[in-house]
Amino acid sequence: MAAPPPADEPGRLARYGVGGIFLLPAVVILGVWILYPTVYTLIRSFFSASGSQWVWLDNYKTLFTTSALLTAIKNNVIWVLVVPAFVTSIGLVFAVLTERVPFAVAFKTAVFLPMAISAFATGITWRIMYLQDPSQGAVNALGRVAVDAVKSPGVLPDASPSTPTLTGSPATGLVLKTPLHAGGVARLGLTAIAPTDVPKTSKQAVAPVAKPGEIVGVVWRDFKPGGGVAGKVEQGELGLPGVTVQLRSGGKTVQSTSSNADGTFAFTNVKPGTYQSAIGASTFNKPWGGFAWLGTKLITPALLIAYIWIWAGFAMVVISAGLAAMPRDVLEAARTDGGTEWQVFRRVTIPLLWPVLTVVLVTMFINVLKVFDLVITLAPGSSQNAANVIALAMWRTSFGGANDFGVGSAIAVFLFLLVVPILALNIRNFKRDAI
Amino acid sequence: MAAVATPTVTPAAPRSQRDSASGKVLRALRRAPVQLLVTVIGLLWLIPTLGLFLTSLLPAQAFTVKGWWQIFSKPSLTTFANYRAVFDNHAIMHSLWTTVEIAVGNTLLVVVIGSLAGYALAWLEFPGRDWIFIGVIGLMVVPLQMALIPMFSLYNHLSLYDTVFGIILFHTAFGLPFAIFLLRNFFVGIPRDIFESARIDGASELRIFIRLVLPLGLPAIASLGIFQFLWTWNDLIVALTFGQNVQPITVAIFSNLRQFGANIDLIAPASFISLIVPLAVFFAFQRYFVQGLLAGSVK
């Protein structure tokens, strides 16, 4: 490097030279890795896939007419509409809430944690959360708790009649065709029940003994190792407890009971007439199978939730800093003037915070346009067309097999054009601050 | 964390100055729902990460039956065999080392080149200085997708494709605009007198840079370094595009995702190893992390 010029009479050129040398590495790298490619991509977007032919706007036409690419644009619109608004509001709520608890630091750390984790690892993390089987995926496990509270799963989700005398379907209940009268006996044999599905309290099934004035019966697993005779209660066959058994007359249920550990049940005080015995449909309620979060229909909402999970901490921290910097006396004055907490929040806090909220909204807008890692990781291959976003479409078109650098460049340019307004905003802010 | 960066102001409650015992109880009761809510949300936010960790401790066949929470009812299932397998897996371990090379190399390059440029744009005189800075601000928002295709072609010519160095340089380029922006703005805040008196004492600009600018700019440089480290450590798209045999850990795990269920005993522990380093960095330096975040966004 050139010898330093004496400070009292600075050689102008030498000083320029020092500045130039300090700046040189950055200028070279930015020039080769950002400026040159930007111009190249712009021009490349007017050439064919192989690059040999000038195709005018054909690549852009492809971008706006291919349904797969339109899906990407449509999805990105959803992202832009949902994420900045949600992240900012959640961040605001969290920032306000943390001002009221003594363990704010612990809470902030917990919520901010995902920011340090890669979008890639987040994708894997949520893929585990979103597994469809409620016994594997935590999100659906929570869902099952809610669903079971409304519609409890039956004792025997999988079972079928052991003899043709039992008809109907699990959805409506299984009905014994044989008409019954007081003093009759109903044998409700079921099979196709996995040993693990047999209720734990189950005991050896007992053949019912007819009683006058009652209709008695048994509901049992009409199967034992080695087979057994269908329709006959045998040694080694288990009673099915907890099964809802109904006594129907003219299609209407007149009595209902639950079977005992040995499978027996009894309807007492049976009036004269013809009855039918049935196993209630609720016995066969299938347990809730869970939502297919990673399937083509729900993949975008699933991605949005995971993405908001990552970025809420960012919004919270930035807004917290804004809150901390707020003039407290203004808030106090508003409270002293008799404003309720909500009024103070709406009329004073939010307007004062607005610049900070805008920063979060704009930052999230840019981030959301570039979202890539999370989508390619969280969405399984079969859902990636449905989950597509612009940045992912650009990559898949260019490097994911099709290798169409023409359309790929056009998508990149489209993405670039979307962030240009932000670029203008940044520069205007700088000029305003500098002058 | 944020308590350091942003002094938490306890909400004053001037209207309830009377600190009678019953008043205290009442206030505590009124706050209880909020505290409960905040606790629940905080725990909720931790669940996914906890889930990944517990999954990584389960034998693969246990996971196919039931989710990670079974470890609470059957703690005996806990095994470190998955981790042992990952540590014995040369490909994964090698990719972890590649990640270290990329992240450290990029962080050093960005810090050095960025502070040189930041200092020049803040305190050295030359024509067009502000215009160059405006240009740098403009480059901050250019999506890296704009550079993927041209650099892919260029890298093939320059033999930079599938090299650690090529990946580092790409990261450096896209890290620099933010770096220069952050450091220039920080350096501008250093009092002019310090540089002036050093110059009068006959110190060269390089000496001023090393002896004054770097130490004084340390808070900003630390923030920047942490950001750069995390960004490159966590990267997927750049390495996926410019590497083939050179695979950082994200790409190495990514190639196993096709058989997610079958490879879960590899994916979960490897992912957790990949995120433990950023987490450690985050916890060790969260003050700088938050400061950098605020400097970058609140402007």
Image: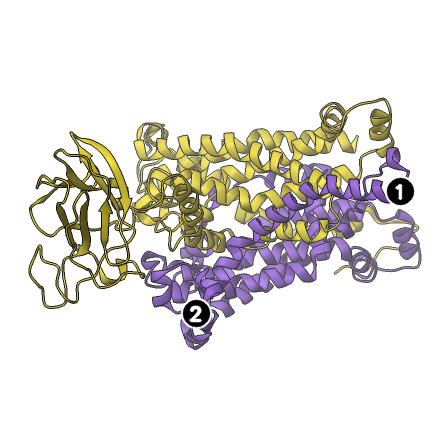
Chain colours: A yellow, B purple
Discs 2 and 1 lie in a common subunit: yes
The answer to which image quadrant residue A202 occupies is bottom left
Estimate the x, y position of residue B276 in percent, counting from the top left. Answer: 56, 64
Dot 1 falls on a residue whose secondary structure is loop
The residue wearing badge 2 is B92
Residue at image coords 34%, 38%:
A386
- Give the amino acid at mark 1: Ser
Instruction: Establish if A213 lies above or below B253.
Output: above
| Residue A392 makes an appearance in the image | yes
* Number of numbered discs visible in the structure rendering: 2
Most distant residue in the front direction: A212
Identity of the amino acid at label 2?
Answer: Ile
Contact? badges 2 and 1 (CB < 8 Å): no
A67 shown above or below B255: above
Neighbours of disc 1 within 10 Å: few (<14), some (14-19), many (20+): few
- Residue B256 position, x and y percent, is 36, 61
Q: Is A321 on the left or on the right of A164, as rendered?
A: right
Q: Chain of mark 2?
A: B
Q: Is residue B268 left or right of residue A396?
A: right
Left/right placement of residue B138 relative to residue A69 reads: right
Tell me the residue that label 1 is attached to.
B20
Q: Position of residue B285 (x, y in %)?
A: 70, 59
Disc 2: CA contacts within 10 A as few (<14), some (14-19) or many (>=20)? many
- Give the number of the mark in front: 2 or 1: 1
User: Is A245 displayed left or right of A364 in the figure?
Assistant: left
Which residue is found at the position 59% from the left and 52% from the top? B43
